[in-house]
Amino acid sequence: MDKALLTIVQEELPISVRPFDDLAERLGITYEETIKRVHRLHGEGVIRRFGPVLETDRVGLSARTLVLMTVPQERMDEVAEIISGFDSVTHNYERSHKYNMWFTLITSSQDQLKTSLSEILEAAQIPETDVLDLPVTRKHKIKVRYSFR
């Protein structure tokens, strides 16, 4: 039942007044059982969050870049916390690479993108020589859906 629930909520959670009632009906279980499973799966970290996936261009966020940084290992947690504190940062990853921290930055303009990146580097005290900025030139959207069957 958990696998069926996870398969559905990836992209088919109904947009309705009572989506979990609709989900329960589709699964053939009660609303209470559905909520209990969702809470448990969230508590276990299987489900990270529920929320929309937005088309950023349509909401005025058209400037995007992937930033790679070389961060001293002993500062990794500190720098990750600083970077993740910026609203314009959407993802932040530690990597096994010369550039060991990668993050994505999205803003409404190229000027704002440059300003945000400068503010991040200043706050994290990372020199520009330790940064590789890879602006998005063309977006290739893929759909990731995990099969639990």
Image: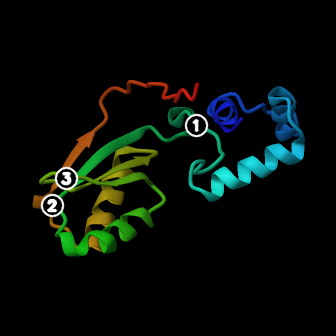
Query: Is 128 placed left or right of 90 in the picture?
Result: left
Q: Secondary structure at mark 1?
A: loop
Q: Please give the residue where the numbered disc 3 appears in the rendered image.
A: 96
Give the numbered dot on residue 2: none
Query: Is 31 placed left or right of 68 in the picture?
Result: right
Quadrant into which the C terminus falls: top right
How far across and how far down the image is residue 37, in percent? 74, 48
How far across and how far down the image is residue 103, in percent? 33, 52
Q: Are marks 2 and 3 in contact (CB under 8 Å)?
A: no
Q: CA distance from mark 1 to mark 2?
A: 31 Å
Q: Secondary structure at mark 2?
A: helix
Q: Please give the residue where the numbered disc 1 appears in the rendered image.
A: 54
How far across and how far down the image is residue 113, in percent? 35, 50
Please name the colour scheme applied to the rendered image.
rainbow
- Closer-to-camera residue (125/146): 146
How far across and how far down the image is residue 6, in percent? 64, 36
**Callout 2 crowding tier (Cα within 10 Å): few <14, some 14–19, many ≥20:** some
Q: Please give the residue where the numbered disc 2 appears in the rendered image.
A: 128
Q: CA distance from mark 2 to mark 3?
A: 20 Å
Residue drawn at (32%, 71%) of the image:
77
Q: Where is residue 119, by image quadrant?
A: bottom left
| Type of amino acid at the residue the image marks with label 2 | Glu
Q: From what the image shows, is residue 35 above or below residue 21?
A: below
Q: Where is residue 64, by image quadrant?
A: top left
Residue drawn at (16%, 60%) of the image:
70
Q: From what the image shows, is residue 136 above or below residue 132?
A: above
Q: Are marks 1 and 2 in contact (CB under 8 Å)?
A: no
